[in-house]
Amino acid sequence: DGGITQSPKYLFRKEGQNVTLSCEQNLNHDAMYWYRQDPGQGLRLIYYSQIVNDFQKGDIAEGYSVSREKKESFPLTVTSAQKNPTAFYLCASSTPAAGYTFGSGTRLTVV
Amino acid sequence: GENVEQHPSTLSVQEGDSAVIKCTYSDSASNYFPWYKQELGKRPQLIIDIRSNVGEKKDQRIAVTLNKTAKHFSLHITETQPEDSAVYFCAASNSGGSNYKLTFGKGTLLTVNP
C-alpha cells in the first residue's frame, strides 16, 4: 500500500455506535491527515496532525475524534454524533519533499 | 481559509483530443498546486504539481500552468487515451515548515471515448 495502510477496507456501523478507522504509515512522515470523500464533494479535511500528541480540526471535524500517540499511527473515531457518516475515508501522510501519500481508503456504511 | 473552485465537473472528449481542467484559488499565500488522478474505488495518485516560482511544468502528455496574479491554474492533457478516464482533483496549499494541508477542488470526471 505504498507505505500507508488503512483498515478495514469496508466497515459497517449501526445507528448510535462508535467505530474506529485505522491508519498506519512507515514512511517516517511527520504530518498525517484524514479526509472524507462524498460523490461530487471532492476531499474534505476532517483532522490533521503535524507532530505526535498534537492535532487540529479541519473543515468538518464535528462528530469525529482522533489521537496521535505515535508518529506511525493516526486513528479516526466516527462517533454517534456524526449524523451522516456514510462515506469513503482517506488517510494521508506528507513531507514537503515527497508530497502526499494516500492510503487505499475505508468505505464506511451505516446499516 | 483557502477555497478552491474547479471546472468543469464533467468533461467528455474523443480519444486523441486535448482536455483542459481549470481551478481557481482564494488564498494569495498558497504556493503549491498538485493535481491528482483517482480511478473508481482507488486512492488519489499525484500526476503533476507546480510551485509558485514557475509558470508552467510539463511531463510527457500532461502540463500544468499557473497564473499567480489571477490565482488560477490549469491541467492540460494532450493526445488523450481511454486510460486517462478518471476523476481529476486540483489542490492548493501554503507549504511551509515540515508539513502542509491541502484544500481540494470538487473534482472533474474525465471520460475519453474511443
Image: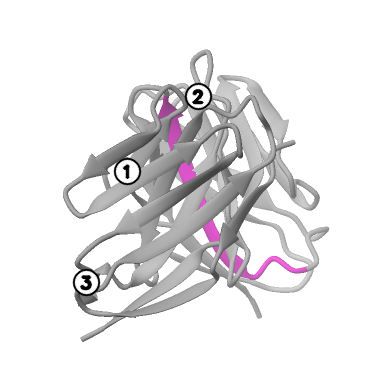
Q: Amino acid at mark 3?
A: Glu
Q: Count up the numbered dots.
A: 3
Q: Which residue is mark 1?
A: B48
Q: Which dot, 3 or 2, sits closer to the camera?
A: 3
Q: Secondary structure at mark 3?
A: helix
Q: Secondary structure at mark 2?
A: loop
Q: Secondary structure at mark 1?
A: strand
Whole-angstrom CA distance, mark 2 to mark 1, is 31 Å
Colour pattern: one colour
Q: Which residue is mark 2?
A: A70
Q: Position of residue B66 (x, y in %)?
A: 46, 38
Which stretch is magenta? Answer: A84-95
Vertical arrangement, residue B112 with respect to residue B73, above or below: below
Q: Residue furthest bottom?
A: B114
Whole-angstrom CA distance, mark 3 to mark 2, is 39 Å
Whole-angstrom CA distance, mark 1 to mark 3, is 17 Å
| First reached walking from the N terminus: tag 1 or tag 3 | 1
For residue A73, say whether it is visible: yes
Q: Amino acid at mark 1?
A: Ile
In front of the other: B109 or A22: B109
The chain containing the residue under callout 2 comes to A
- Asked if residue B74 lies left or right of residue A17, the reply is left
* Magenta residues, dominant SS class: strand
> Looking at the image, do the residues carrying marks 3 and 2 touch, with CB atoms under 8 Å apart?
no
Q: Which residue is mark 3?
A: B83
Q: Which dot, 2 or 1, sits closer to the camera?
A: 1
